[in-house]
């Protein structure tokens, strides 16, 4: 037998090894093995088994052995890994690597074992006690044996606490075989700190009933597709549908995976799942230590838990009887991984579901154009949940055109329109809460010298205005490379003492709000301030308890949080995202606006939302009417006209390097090779500098291939990118179904 093995070096190549006869019965696809490699030994995984090899059998080497310190990868995940490598043009090694958490793959963390003792055979033990009842020499042994029978199985330490215990008698009984030992893997029982009270399913609403019926049909394989697009506004009860669908899957003896965007994996969310499923649930969040991650993986792998909830990578939870994958907020862009393999967790979830005969629920209030299109084409089943569970009226949304406002007095910030100021003041008077939202952190976007025209830019990166000024820290920071420099007090070029700041961010918004609403209790939340998840919880908690009146923030506050006291949301710069050079700019803006608007009026009072803008835009109007259907029709027409996804597939190829000429030359060579695959359903945009043309001193070129029937060209791209060596200093990255064309 031949094993095709992938090692830990990224060559995108399998190596053939002979399987020694003694390993044949235990070796399987996914086994971790050690193999001779050159003069060393390496660890790898068996990708497939075959009878023959195309290499000279005389030259083949044998496997050294099974790597006992590492768990095997379940065979179905190996299949998924192969698909990822092919489709996303990644090396097989990269793909296999994403299947296992580093803590498991490295073999660094070992499983903790505990030894449990019990009486081997009750009848034999009783016979022993009767036979030796009169021998004082054995009295201690008999006492210990009685103790073990009485207490039942347990670790030695537990018996040792009993009076009359004798270690030597205990050991002697073990030796005689009257007490036997077995080892069991233990995990530190890490729990989500708070004890969660169990709850029970709610009686489904009509909409929820409809969704659950469709899911039951799906689980019984009586539907044309295994994917349901659950399209329901915030608060329509989607989470309750997930919970009941999972219960159903558990009843069938199967397991479930729930994916949520990392930012939504809050204690609030986890509590709802924990309350329903208790210890049958494993929570995979990014703050787990290696040890904890290792333990959770083993709990899943050994079938001790039946549900895993987590961000993107939870998709690879090693269940072997998967029944359901839920992808909540399926439109969220954090499901796309930015490093190789650049997979999209929603799309891979659909593939894993297909491979393992499991159903998939994609839930969203604003489905991605791709998903909606798939539903329209009959590839997914659509279930619309229109009504909010509590029949709360939607918030009142107004668009305020800043161009109609009177010019501000000199020296007064122009961030808040009189209408928004008035609305906030009303809330303060009534003791209600407001959120002010601006999707840009920092104090100002850039600084500029009015005397000589100097503009501060990150010297390593390219685009204009890319420094963000933070007044509290007195620094300029680059959001592309993360570089930080002290903010100059005078112009570095000409020494002029009055430098100006242009644009605005949340930090400036906060100080502006403090000036306008004196006496109000104001908090701010953005990635500048929130260094850890704890910072985040502290501010949220204050706000939730009503110890803040106004919360200022970036998109961090847009997602899924529930604050009953909030009756007003102001979006300072609602059109901000529309000028991005990206065909998804409209979609992202619409999603963001409706999501933020959803933060208003979750409590008793009806919510109000104000979008400030300085331009006319259909996108804003659709968002203000919460008209998803209208928007989506408009957006799909635009994409169809321009041949963008979902009407086509798209692959972006990036070329990077310090010498621009080398990058450009290699990009042109690469494009030339691809020309052979051109056909009339395909558009190849020749390489050109990317919109962000330089990051960290690396010049960036981009080319885009889009169309239908991409399979052949994708294979060609994969081979060119992975198996042809570019000139020194140039790197190539392929992004299939790229979410950002920057
Ligand atoms: P979504 O996930 O769509 O935002 P949720 O499932 O979180 O909606 O439901 C919103 C609120 O309504 C929650 O507080 C939830 O407990 C409640 N809810 C959901 N379904 C029901 C139901 N069938 N009966 C009563 N309350 C419900
Ligand atoms: Zn930079």
Image (cartoon, rainbow, N blue to C red):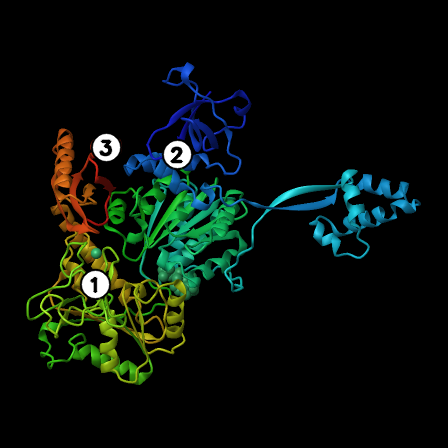
Name which of mark 2 and mark 3 comes first in the sequence.
2
Front of the two marks 3 and 1: 3
Q: Residue 456 or 626: which is nearer the viewer?
A: 456
Residue that carries the numbered disc 2 in the rendered image: 79
Q: Residue 486 or 352: which is nearer the viewer?
A: 486
Is residue 274 visible in the rendered image? The answer is yes
Name which of mark 1 and mark 2 comes first in the sequence.
2
Q: Position of residue 221 (x, y in %)?
A: 41, 40
Distance from disc 2 to disc 3, alpha carbons, whole Å, reads: 28 Å
Is residue 622 visible in the rendered image? The answer is no
Contact, mark 1 vs mark 2 (Cβ under 8 Å) = no
Q: Residue 81 or 18: which is nearer the viewer?
A: 18
Q: Position of residue 310 (x, y in %)?
A: 41, 52
Q: Residue at x 30, y 34 (%)?
A: 86
Question: Looking at the rendered structure, which numbered label has been put on residue 205?
Answer: none
Q: Which type of secondary structure does the marked residue at label 3 adopt?
A: loop
Image: 243 above or below 647: below
Q: Position of residue 584 (x, y in %)?
A: 19, 52
Question: Residue placed farthest to the left in the image?
Answer: 452
Q: Residues within 10 Å of mark 3 (few under 14, many from 20)?
A: few
Residue that carries the numbered disc 3 in the rendered image: 725
Specify the quadrant of the image occupied by residue 220: top left
Q: Residue 409 or 251: which is nearer the viewer?
A: 409
Q: Residue at x 33, y 38 (%)?
A: 84
Specify the quadrant of the image occupied by residue 571: bottom left
Distance from disc 1 to disc 2, alpha carbons, whole Å, reads: 42 Å
Residue that carries the numbered disc 1 in the rendered image: 623
């Amino acid at each position: 037998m031949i094993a095709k093995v992938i090692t830990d070096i990224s060559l995108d190549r399998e190596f053939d090894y002979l399987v020694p006869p003694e390993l044949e019965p235990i070796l399987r696809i996914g086994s971790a093995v050690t193999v001779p490699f050159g003069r060393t030994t390496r660890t790898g995984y068996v990708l497939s088994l075959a009878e023959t090899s195309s290499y000279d059998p005389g030259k083949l080497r044998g496997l050294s052995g099974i790597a006992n310190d590492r768990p095997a990868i379940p065979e179905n995940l190996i299949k998924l890994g192969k698909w990822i490598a092919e489709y996303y043009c990644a090396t097989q090694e990269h793909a296999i690597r994403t299947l296992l958490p580093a803590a498991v793959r490295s073999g660094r963390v070992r499983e903790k074992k505990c030894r449990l003792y019990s009486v081997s055979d009750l009848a034999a033990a009783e016979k022993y006690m009767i036979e030796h009842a009169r021998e004082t020499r054995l009295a201690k042994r008999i006492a210990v044996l009685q103790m073990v029978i009485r207490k039942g199985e347990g670790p030695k330490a537990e018996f040792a606490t009993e009076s009359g215990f004798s270690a030597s008698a205990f050991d002697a009984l073990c030796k005689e075989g009257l007490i036997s030992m077995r080892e069991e893997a233990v995990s530190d029982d890490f729990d989500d700190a708070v004890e969660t009270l169990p709850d029970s399913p709610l009686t489904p609403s009509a909409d929820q009933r409809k969704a659950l019926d469709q899911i039951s049909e799906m689980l019984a394989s009586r539907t044309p597709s295994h994917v349901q697009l659950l399209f329901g506004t915030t608060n329509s009860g989607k989470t309750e549908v997930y919970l009941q669908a999972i219960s159903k899957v558990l009843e069938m003896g199967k397991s479930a995976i729930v994916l949520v965007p990392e930012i939504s994996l809050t204690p609030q969310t986890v509590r709802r799942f924990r309350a329903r499923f208790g210890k049958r649930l494993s929570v995979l969040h990014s703050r787990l230590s290696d040890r904890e991650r290792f333990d959770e993986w083993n709990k899943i792998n050994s079938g001790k838990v039946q549900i895993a909830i987590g961000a993107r990578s939870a998709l690879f939870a090693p269940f072997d009887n998967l029944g359901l994958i839920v992808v909540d907020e399926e439109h969220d862009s954090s499901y796309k991984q930015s490093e190789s393999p650049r997979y999209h967790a929603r799309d891979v979830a659909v593939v894993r579901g297909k491979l393992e005969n499991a159903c998939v629920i994609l839930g969203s209030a604003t489905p991605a154009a791709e998903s909606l299109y798939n539903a329209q084409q009959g590839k997914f089943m659509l279930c619309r949940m229109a009504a909010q569970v509590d029949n709360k009226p939607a918030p009142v949304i107004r668009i305020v055109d800043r161009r109609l406002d009177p010019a501000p007095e000199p020296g007064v910030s122009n961030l808040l329109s009189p209408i928004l100021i008035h609305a906030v003041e009303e809330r303060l008077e009534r003791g209600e809460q407001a959120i002010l939202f601006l999707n840009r952190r920092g104090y100002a976007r850039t600084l500029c010298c009015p005397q000589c025209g100097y503009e501060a830019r990150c010297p390593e990166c390219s685009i204009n205005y890319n420094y963000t000024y933070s007044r509290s820290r007195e620094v300029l920071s680059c959001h592309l490379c993360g570089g930080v420099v002290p903010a100059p007090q005078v112009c570095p070029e000409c020494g002029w003492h009055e430098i100006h700041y242009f644009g605005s961010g949340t930090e400036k918004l906060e100080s502006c709000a403090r000036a306008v609403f004196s006496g109000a209790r104001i908090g701010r939340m953005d990635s500048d301030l929130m260094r850890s998840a704890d910072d985040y919880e502290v501010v949220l908690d204050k706000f939730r308890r009503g110890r803040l009146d106004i919360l200022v923030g970036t998109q961090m506050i847009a997602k899924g949080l529930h604050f009953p006291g909030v009756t007003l949301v102001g979006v300072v710069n609602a059109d901000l995202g529309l000028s991005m050079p990206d065909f998804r700019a409209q979609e992202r803006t619409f999603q963001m606006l409706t999501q933020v608007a959803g933060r208003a009026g979750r409590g008793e009072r009806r919510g109000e939302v104000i979008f400030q803008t300085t331009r006319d835009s259909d996108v804003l109007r659709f968002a203000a009417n919460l008209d998803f259907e209208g928007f989506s029709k408009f957006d799909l027409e635009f994409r169809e006209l321009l041949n963008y996804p979902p009407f086509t597939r798209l692959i972006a190829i990036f070329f990077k390097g310090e010498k621009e000429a080398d990058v450009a030359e290699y990009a042109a060579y690469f494009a030339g090779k691809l020309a052979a695959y051109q056909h009339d359903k395909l558009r190849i945009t020749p390489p050109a500098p990317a919109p962000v043309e330089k990051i960290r001193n690396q010049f960036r070129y981009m080319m885009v291939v889009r169309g239908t029937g991409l399979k052949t060209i994708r294979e060609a791209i994969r081979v060119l990118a992975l198996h042809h060596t570019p000139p020194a200093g140039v790197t190539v990255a392929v992004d299939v179904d790229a979410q950002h064309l920057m």
